[in-house]
Image (spheres, coloured by chain):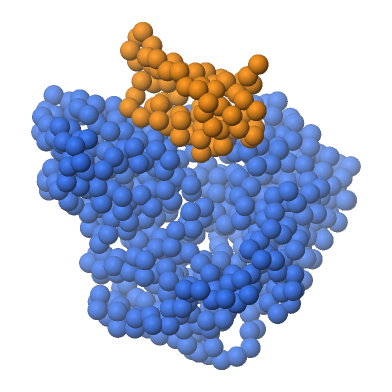
Chain colours: A blue, B orange
Amino acid sequence: MNGARWLAQALVAEGVDTLFGYPGGAIMPFYDALYDVPELKHVLVRHEQGAAFAANGYARASGRVGVCVATSGPGATNLFTGIADALVDSVPLVAITGQVPTGLMGTDAFQELDVFGMSFPMVKHSFIVRHVDELPHIVGEAFRIARSGRPGPVLIDLPKDVQNADASHLPPHAPLPIDDVEAPKDASLHEALALISLAQRPVIYGGGGIALGDAVQDFRTFVDATQIPTVLTLKGLGALPSKHPLNLGMLGMHGSRAANMAVQDADLLIVAGARFDDRATGKLAEFAPHARVVHMDVDACEIGKLRVADAGVRGDIRTTLAKLTLPVAAHLHGRNGPVRKAWRSQCQLHAMQHAARYDAPGASVYAPSLLKKLSESAPDACVVCDVGQHQMWVAQHWQMDHPRKHLTSGALGAMGFGLPAAIGAQLQDRDAQVICVSGDGSIQMNIQELATLRRYNLPVKIVLLDNQALGMVRQWQELFFDKRYSEIDLSDNPDFIALAAAFGIEALHVERADAVDAAISALLAANGPTLLHVAIDTAANVWPLVPPNRNNAQMIDADKDHANALPA
Amino acid sequence: MRYQLELTLRRAEGALTRVLGTAERRGFAPLSVDAHAHADGERWQLRMTVQGEREPEGLQHQLAKLHDCLAVKVQPCA
């Protein structure tokens, strides 16, 4: 047995059943080993970036570690966008890259790059295997680190001679247990409770850490028991069902007006697994100006990083929420009970007054309406987005019921994420209904993965919202750059129907609002991979919007307030 | 503000580079670096002086999160 074979068997021992990759020179011994390890299903993508995003989508949807593989040099660099995305969105991932033989490292050999060195700012940790005897320790540590605490990507750079080296003396791989997450300290819980008990206008601000901490149910229990109005980040969407009466929606740049108003008026923010990202806060110095902050997070780095926490509760989010639920709920009936009730009513009134409308005039397709209808027609679907206007429309209008059923490149905002991530999501559960919502810009960044979709006959449904432009950039140029449209025109897009057909993918087309219902029905009734091409208005924008350098109370809406827009 | 950093690192490939990169990216410019291998051959002892305007606790937390960082102490320079 050589090192490559030992590694393949170690992956099986780690519980890996699927890996996404692309072979090449320096990783060939590993691919040879795969030939004899049928327990590992290898998915051949058509570009290494697709492998990293597919593993990323697999991990996001399942909560398990995603694994991707590439060769040295360009294979490895092509993985990096998907690895970086996993870092900033806290996705457990193990990336395995081939490397030139150790004797050639540092000699500028063919397809040699210092992938290990390049990885540092993009990984939770990385290893280079200098000797086959290091494999058991490194593989065990890689999976342990990827899974433990705040999850993230780990890279293993594996020279070819190490893959070929005799590994028959190595013991079978034994996975390491993940680190116990520290429970929150009682003192910090007491501080949090003291602040919460005094609050008259509290708001819960929930983020991606809720799902990462496997705390969705605990979070819902906390919200229900405390009856505190709740806003969610992009990655927190689904932690509370969209229709929950206390859910005011997403906060931030394209958040709901009700969510942003509540945060700006709040006297206390109870932050659960969120990190004051600039897209959520707007102008940070004016964010939630009246609020004290209880910040609950597993990662000490996030507490106080951007906003001082009056009470920082570091530790396991499930335990934190569970320990706070009853005491906080008890205070509901305390001295501030009536005031809080009035506050809750005010927040809910704002939510009603500023609810999204779907009665857009005209005969053309109104994307928010289509997305809302689609989500209601496929209530159990996992929606996987690309990046741009369509991503924000999904965040605003999709009826979500769990964060692991809304996969989106949040912090990195990587166009090209959607299609390969949808492939990963579908492969982690063949029976799941997976819908990829993309744009004409984004889908062309990894459109080659239509071939992967076809090869494995994955029934992913793609909704391609085609406005023949880079819509989000166009929108900003319209609002903040005096309509000086620079390099956003995609009116020479390919014929997407013909393109899909060339890949063997069935495709449908819709361009009129009165045909949307039939198109959705046809899409969902289709058996295999299917693309619905939706022609939408180039000038359609995402509303509301917090302009740059403004606070979240200064949202602007369509056809009004544009005079308030500031240059970017 | 200037800060003195005292770190104990696992003597692993890339450990020193990660510390330097983390300090710089998080807003602290190195002014001096002194590193030597510990007698047991398994650890680095690293002393750095850095300059930055951000809160030093943030840097301490970020460094502590590095897998190869076994201990870190950050304090203002006298």
B74 sits to left or right of A489: right
> In the rendered image of this protein, does residue A265 appear above or below residue A9?
below
Q: Position of residue A60 (x, y in %)?
A: 43, 51
> In the rendered image of this protein, does residue A352 appear above or below residue A332?
below
Task: Tell me if residue B71 can be seen.
Answer: no
Task: Tell me if residue B4 can be seen.
Answer: yes
> In the rendered image of this protein, does residue A175 appear above or below residue A420?
above
The residue lying furthest to the top in this view is B39
Q: Quadrant of the N terminus of chain A?
A: top left
The residue lying furthest to the front in this view is B31
Q: Quadrant of the C terminus of chain A?
A: bottom right
Residue A268 appears in which quarter of the rendering? top right
Front residue of A187/A76: it is A76
Residue placed at 72% from the left, 34% from the top?
A311
Q: Position of residue A462 (x, y in %)?
A: 39, 72
Q: Position of residue A26 (x, y in %)?
A: 17, 44
Front residue of B18/B3: it is B3
Q: Position of residue A544 (x, y in %)?
A: 67, 69
User: Looking at the image, how many numbered discs can be counted on the residues?
Assistant: 0
Front residue of A507/A474: it is A474
Residue placed at 13% from the left, 35% from the top?
A161
A47 sits to left or right of A178: left
Residue A373 appears in which quarter of the rendering? bottom right
